[in-house]
Amino acid sequence: MVPTSPPAVPSLDELINLFATSSSSPATLAPPSASIFSTPLETSKPKHAVENLKPNLIPVFVEIPADLLTPVAAYLKIAKDSKYSFLLESVIGGENLARYSFVGADPIKTIRTGEGFDVEGDPLTALEKELAPYRYVKIPQIGTFTGGAVGFITYDSIVHFEPVTKPKNPLHNPFPGMPEAFFMLTSTNLIFDHIYQTVKIVSHVHLQDGTPPSQIPALYEEAVGRIETLRRKLMTPDVPLPPQGPVHLGYETTSNVGEEGYKAFVTKLKEHIVAGDIIQAVPSQRFTRKTDVHPFNVYRNLRRTNPSPYMYYLDCGETQLVGASPETLCHIKDRKLRNHAIAGTRKRGKDEEEDQALEADLLSDEKERSENLMLSDLARNDVHRVCKPESVKIDHLFRVERFSHVMHLTSQVSGILRDDQSRFQALRSILPAGTLS
C-alpha cells in the first residue's frame, strides 16, 4: 500500500499569487556542487534586462522522509525505463557527506552540439538561447537547484571560447557519434537533504508567454501529477539493479599515443619552455579499456573508493559519464564568481600525526608552491576579464585540503561579475582549466 501523498508546496492559491506578484530571476543553468548551498544559476542576461517581465516558471514540490531511501536507490528506481538521467552527489573534503544530492530522469529536452549534431558552434550560445525564455521564481522553501541544464562540455569545445586554440587541421573525434557538448533540460527532479533526511520531489509550472492565467490550475495539476508519479516509483520496495553479466578480466589498456609518443610530447614541450613560448603545459594521453561492468556499477565502486566533492553519473543515451573530482572550476552565486585552483599533492597518512607531517612537507615544497601560485595568477587573470577590477581577490592561498586518499594544496580567487557580463561569459573566460592545459 502506497502512503497518501503530502500536500504540494506552494498551494495553488499561493502559486497564482506568486505569478502575479513575484519578481523573477533568469532561468537555471546547472546545479551547484552538492557541497555548496546555492540558488539556481542565471542566463546570460543581466538582471535589469528581465526585471520588467513577469515570471513564468515556479517550482512545486512534495517533501517525504528519506531515512530509508538513498540517492543511489532512488536513481535506480526513477531511471529504470529512462533513456536520459543523472545522479549528482558530493562528499566534502572526501570525509563528510554534503547536504544535498540531486537525481533526475526523463528531461523535457536534450541538446547536442558539434559537427553533425543539432547545433554546431559554441555550445554555451545554444544553451543560452534555450534557457532565455524562462524567468524563474525562487521560493524560500528551496535554497538550491530545482531544475535546469545538466550535462557536459568536452575539452575541445574551447576552440569556440579561445580561437587561438583552434588547430590548423581539424581534430579527429576519437569517439564518433559523441557530441561536443550534451545537455539535459530537466524539470522534474529529486533533492535529497542529508541533514533533515528528506527528499523533495520537485516539478515546475511553466506559464508560457501568451498563456492566460486561467490555465494555471491545469498546469499546477499536471506538475502535481508528475510529482505523484515519481513518488509512487520511490515507494516501490524493490530496487531494480542494473543488468550485470559475467565480468572477464585481463582486457588490455591502450594509450592513444603510446609511451614513445608521450615522451615526444614531453621533449617538445620542454623545448617550448626553454624558448620562452610557454611556462607550463600538461601533456595528456587517453587510456581505453574494454569492460563488461555496467557503467552504473563502475560509478557505485568509484563513489566508495574515491568519495569526492563532485561525484556524478550521467546517462546521455549512447554515452555514460562516470566521474569524481575535487575541483571547482566555476561557481557563481549572487553574481560572485569563484575559481578553485588545485596544484600540489601528497598521499594521506596512516594517522593524524603522519597527515600533519605530510601536510608540512607539502607546504614547504617550493615546486608545489610555485605551480600553485602560477595557477592562482592564471585564475586571477581569467576572473579579472569578466569581474569588477576592485572586486577581484585571492580568498586563500596555499591551503591544504584533505580528501579520501590524498591531500591537495589549494587556492581560491573570486570577483563580482561586471554588469555587462553573464554567467555564460564567465564560464567562457575560465575555460580551459589551467590545471588541465
Image: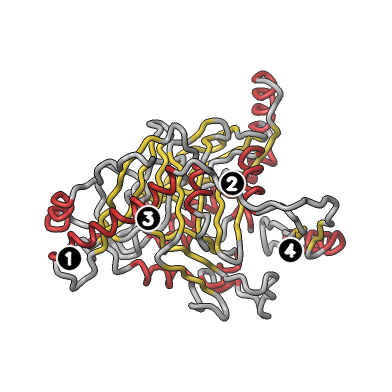
Q: Quadrant of residue 177?
A: bottom right
Of labels 2 and 1, the one closer to you: 1
Residue 77 seen in this snapshot: yes
> Which residue is under mark 3?
188
The amino acid type of the residue labelled 3 equals Thr
Disc nearer the start of the sequence (3/4):
3
Q: CA distance from mark 3 to mark 2?
A: 26 Å
Residue at 43% in and 36% down? 99
Q: In the drawing, what numbered circle is on residue 272?
A: 4
> Which residue is under mark 2?
325
Asked if labels 2 and 3 touch by Cβ distance under 8 angstroms, the answer is: no
> Which residue is under mark 1?
215
* Quadrant where the N terminus is found in the figure: top left
Say what secondary structure mark 4 lies in: helix
| Mark 4 neighbour density, 10 Å: few (under 14) some (14–19) many (20 or more) | some
| Mark 3 neighbour density, 10 Å: few (under 14) some (14–19) many (20 or more) | many
Say what secondary structure mark 3 lies in: loop
Task: Indicate whether 342 appears above or below 423.
Answer: above
Closer to the camera in the image, 141 or 54: 141
Disc nearer the start of the sequence (1/3):
3
Q: CA distance from mark 3 to mark 4?
A: 50 Å
The amino acid type of the residue labelled 4 equals His
Disc nearer the start of the sequence (2/1):
1
